[in-house]
Image (cartoon, rainbow, N blue to C red):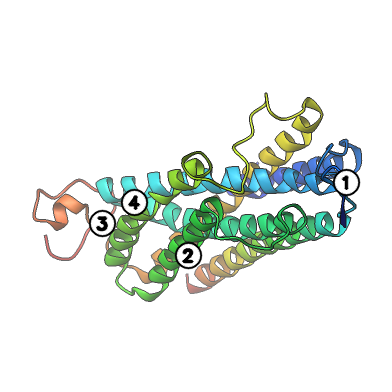
Amino acid sequence: MGKGVWPFVVAGFGIALLVWGSTWGLAFAPREAYMGEVQRIMYVHVPTAWNTMLVLTFAFVCALVSLLRGGWTWDARLEAAIEAGVVLSALVCMQGSIWARPTWGVWWDWDPRLTTTAVLLFAFGGILALRQFVDDPVKRAVWSSVAVVIAYVDVPLVYFSVRWWNSLHQLQSTPETVSRAFHWPLRINAFGVLFLLIGLVELRARLAFLRREAESAPPPVRVAEALGGAPPPYGGLATGGKR
Amino acid sequence: MSGAPGGVIQGGWEFVIAAYVASAVILLGYAFSVFWRYRRARSRRDGAR
């Protein structure tokens, strides 16, 4: 298998897992005692929520590495992770809204968990828009990395919102609080979304890198260098501009 | 979909189907969008060489 093919294979494997897990969840998993059939939304909603947190954490790591080390590879990964995080945040809000209607009686409520998740969507959506509007690739890399580090503060707020404040949303489920009959479709779909995400983030990063090549500008400088520090080595990439 | 005495939700398949269809459309739509943009960028780069 060629090096360039693996993201397609991994994404395809993720889709196959999602088909398997969803079929299990819809057709073979038992009905929940109180929520009835509606609980089956859990098999897509919870894996989406977990992977949203995961990909935004990856974006945070990419932003830090991009700021500290420079180079276009981490900037391309950052762009890919932000975009995937925005798509998953939008999806998790949509799934949650559909689940909220039959269980809470409303499509949306300004509850702490929902509000912090909406903030996540708009914050990272704004950073994605920022990247489209900034023409200078060095400024784009540095500004969006700083913005991601700031916006990431909301991720632990989303996670702990149900513990810190009164919330309509239930607390995080654990294997001890979820019936064993529900475990497998949940886990299969969680890995399905994860594998799909790995393949898509890698392809999206390659796309960002191709665009960057087309712009043919020097790589972003490290923060220390931008502030007048010593110029760092760039691992073979050509540097340009003022030092 | 309706609530029954005892707080047990009856029915609700329409919400389940809506959630799964929305998930499939968004995930597959995004996957297709990434594949398509990547192929286009690669063919543009190969054409420029």
Q: Residues within 10 Å of mark 3 (few under 14, many from 20)?
A: few
Look at the numbered discs 1 and 3 and tell me whether their residues touch, using CB distance below 8 Å. Answer: no
Task: Report helix, strand or loop for mark 3.
Answer: loop
Task: Report helix, strand or loop for mark 1.
Answer: loop
Instruction: From the viewer's side, name the closer residue of A109 and A75.
Output: A109
Q: Residues within 10 Å of mark 2 (few under 14, many from 20)?
A: some
Residue hosting label 3 = A238
Q: Quadrant of residue A194?
A: top right
Residue A149: give its label.
Answer: 4
Residue A122: give its label.
Answer: 2
Residue B5: give its label.
Answer: 1
Dot 4 falls on which chain? A
Instruction: From the viewer's side, name the closer residue of A153 and A242.
Output: A153
Disc number lying in front (2 or 4): 2
Can you give x and y, in whole percent of width and height, for residue A43 in the image?
Answer: 74, 43
What residue appears at the point 75 percent right and 30 percent down from the top-left corner?
Answer: A183
Look at the numbered discs 1 and 2 and tell me whether their residues touch, using CB distance below 8 Å. Answer: no
Disc number lying in front (4 or 3): 4
Q: CA distance from mark 3 to mark 2?
A: 36 Å
Kind of residue at disc 2: Phe
Horizontal placement of A70 versus B24: left or right? Answer: left
Q: Quadrant where the N terminus of chain A lies? A: top right
Task: Report helix, strand or loop for mark 4.
Answer: helix
Dot 1 falls on which chain? B
Residue A213: give its label.
Answer: none
Look at the numbered discs 4 and 1 and tell me whether their residues touch, using CB distance below 8 Å. Answer: no
Look at the numbered discs 2 and 4 and tell me whether their residues touch, using CB distance below 8 Å. Answer: no
